[in-house]
Image (cartoon, rainbow, N blue to C red):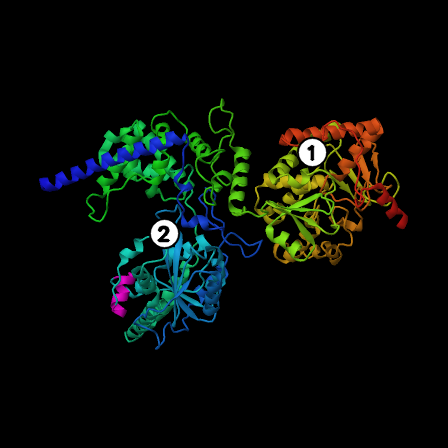
Amino acid sequence: MDSKYKLRIAFTVTCLAVATILLANKIRKKRKQKNITSCYLKSEAKPQHSFKRVLANNSYAPFKHLKLHENSSDLHPYESEIKALLENSQLEIEFSNESMDMSMSDKYVWVDDESKLKELVEVLSKETVFAVDTEQHSLRSFLGFTALIQISTRDEDYLVDTIAVHDSMGLLAPVFANPNICKVFHGADNDVIWLQRDFHIYVVNLFDTAKACDVLSKPQRSLAYLLETYCGVTTNKLYQREDWRQRPLPIDMVEYARMDAHYLLYIADCLVSELKNQKNDNSASENSATLDDKLHFVSEAIRRSNALCLQLFTKDLEASPGQSAAASIISRHLNDHGNSANNSQFQDLVRRLCCWRDLMARMHDESLRYVLSDNAIISLAETAPLTSADVCTIISQADIDMDFLNTNSSPRFPSSVVLSHLDDFPCLLQDEINNLDDMFQLILKKHLGPNGSCPFSLYNYGLLSKTNIKLSKKLVSKASGYKLSKQVARKASRELFVQKFSCKSPVYHNCRIYANDGRLLCYCDRRKLEWYVQRDLAKLVDEDPPAIMLLFEPKGRPEDEGNDFYIQICVDCHEKAHSAAERYKKKVALEFGIPLFVQKVVNSNEEQDVSGSSTSVMKLGDCGVSPLELRTAAMALMRHGPRMPPQRREELKQVVKKYYGGRDISEEDLEKALLVGMSPHEKRRLRKKRGISLNNTSLNNIVSDKDIKGDDVDSYGNEVQEPENGSSLDILDPSEPNGQVHPSSDGSVFATCSSKLSLLGHGPHGKQVVDYLLKNHGEIGIQEFCQRWRQVFVESINPRFLPAGWDVTHSGRREFGDFSVYNPANKASVATKD
């Protein structure tokens, strides 16, 4: 290497170092001005962030494959169809025809919306064979994703923009899984699992031209070799490494993509002909019979191809983040530098940096090599820089040392992830953190916790809710008192839900609708307001913001006349108030000794009602079984009971047994438990699914036509089911005279029931609390109890504005509107009519 070349390299390195320092200082100054850490994802849009359906996120949880049936195993969903093809590897189709366009004209179909995708599905469903190839993007994605699919029939080329139609790609699944349609790939080992990962598309009936090359013992098996040999076409495989996310695609990339699939059917035909000739040549030899018995060349190529279809995509899971990468880096470094590199501090820093890189790559949906190269990790671990500028310089220098011999590579700055989170490195390189789990939790809290620096997405949300790493209860020191557990995941769930589903433009436009007496009824959008005005049903009373007054008496009004609170309260406040109410109900249950839920259901043939009636009896004990807990346990036992660990299976059985009074439970009991507290809509859905999820014929009798019609529907909209052995299960109703509570000889409380109230809610509990207060404290007790509930409400949401005259301690009797169903006059008139 001459001195001029060395001088040029030194000059390049010096310029890069200076530029890196200036850039790092500029970024640091910006952050000081903003006084916050800003993640680059808040300003940089990535194509995959537009996806609304992501099957493989970046969590540490295993990938969930398609299940055709609820009771199907965890094996390949089309295993039986593929094995049938393996047993009968016969080829009965011709891949190409005489009219095939070998010149590859400029005509092709670009599929970038759902309607075009449906048209493609219709075309492919009529074909017996088509060729497929895929283009992937992996640099700016942790797991990678399919950016383009090329499909060629005998007559047409299709380029499917999988970024534009990502959420609709499932439409292609039935065609790819059809065993009567042959799919031709070249080197399908990765394509098969990539289609599973991104779209739950499973390939059934595959012919792989690369496997045919193996059977024929070709000198090369690359597609470029086959294109040049059989079609006289040369292709530049460097395009495979291009950024296939870019839209629109350059013309040369479009031609390259089309070429991979366009000639594939013709190449397959040529290879099959050679396979047949290979057999005929062998037949002329002395050992032809033996060879034909051992190996049928066409069948062998087909068998090897279809064996690829049985592959299943899996995530690479580790005991701790970056563990295998750290072990590999340390091993290679020891081999290169001998015992001098056997430094415990160096190895510890490598593990920290690999842990950080793994978590940040998952969090930002970037590849490991994009976030931080292995060379950069070694350099950082060896030098342990103290400043952000030094960190940037060392990373850039390490990448230059790795790439300078490659004339096509250009010097790289540190990645966007590193530049956005330079303030992590002092902690990584200098602080004493002995446990990698503590580091994992610290990074997770800092970037995805409350007020975290990084935005939530469908890719990183699973890091909070689906990690299989055993996290300790606290993220950092005990002094901080900050816990990961449920509050972080709940906040993440809320933020992700709002981000994904909230409207991106105004909905109500602050338009108001008033009744003809001036009472504010609701807020609405401009279209609804104009609808009333155009039909002379309302008049405009204000223009900014728009408001109308109805010219007729509305059918329904807010029940609380003169109180705008229930019109204006936001969803978040409702949620807070509801959560506080649920917690307070539990306190009330303990205070009065009245359970929230039914503990036992005793059939009429097992125990006689204390009142002598024929109704069934419910036993209300100290701790009940909530319907949600009951149904969850029953469903888990029905779906996965035999495969569960014995201890867990017994725990769930005890939950169901508690509901049935401790007796042994049957399959029918589990099915009935699923119906506890279901709404009519939920029962209809269950009835539609019962042939799939529950293959027990007794469910037909449980969810009957009578249930669907709603003949036995209680006042809460829930239907009443029949317990076993034909005994009727009725539930307490405060309006019925025979709905009473009686003490039993063992001190338990039994409730005789009527068919009005579901087991889902807290109806029996509420009725008993009111009865208790009236009996022991009268009306004053009820008023004080109401005041306690008002206090709970105020403390939960801390409202800044409340209606005039509203007070926690007010005790005035409530007045109802003329049309309210709670107006005593209306109740009296209804009773007279009855």
Label 2 sits on residue: 137
> Most prominent secondary structure in the magenta stretch?
helix
Q: What stretch is highlighted in magenta?
A: 220-232
Residue that lies at the very extreme toward the top in this rendered image: 479
Element type where label 1 sits in the image: loop
The reply to whether the magenta stretch includes residue 502 is no
Q: Quadrant of residue 653?
A: top right
- Give the image location of residue 808, x and y in percent: 72, 28
Query: Does residue 590 show up?
Result: no
- Give the image location of residue 706, x and y in percent: 76, 57
Residue drawn at the location 64% of the way across and 40% of the way down: 568
> How busy is the neighbourhood of tag 1: few (under 14 within 10 Å), some, or many (20 plus)?
few
Query: Does residue 732 show up?
Result: yes
Q: In this view, does 18 lie to the left or right of 637?
A: left
Residue drawn at the location 44% of the way across and 71% of the way down: 128
Q: Distance between the residues labelled 1 and 2?
A: 57 Å
The residue nearer to you, when weighing 12 against 722, is 12
What's the mark number on residue 803? 1
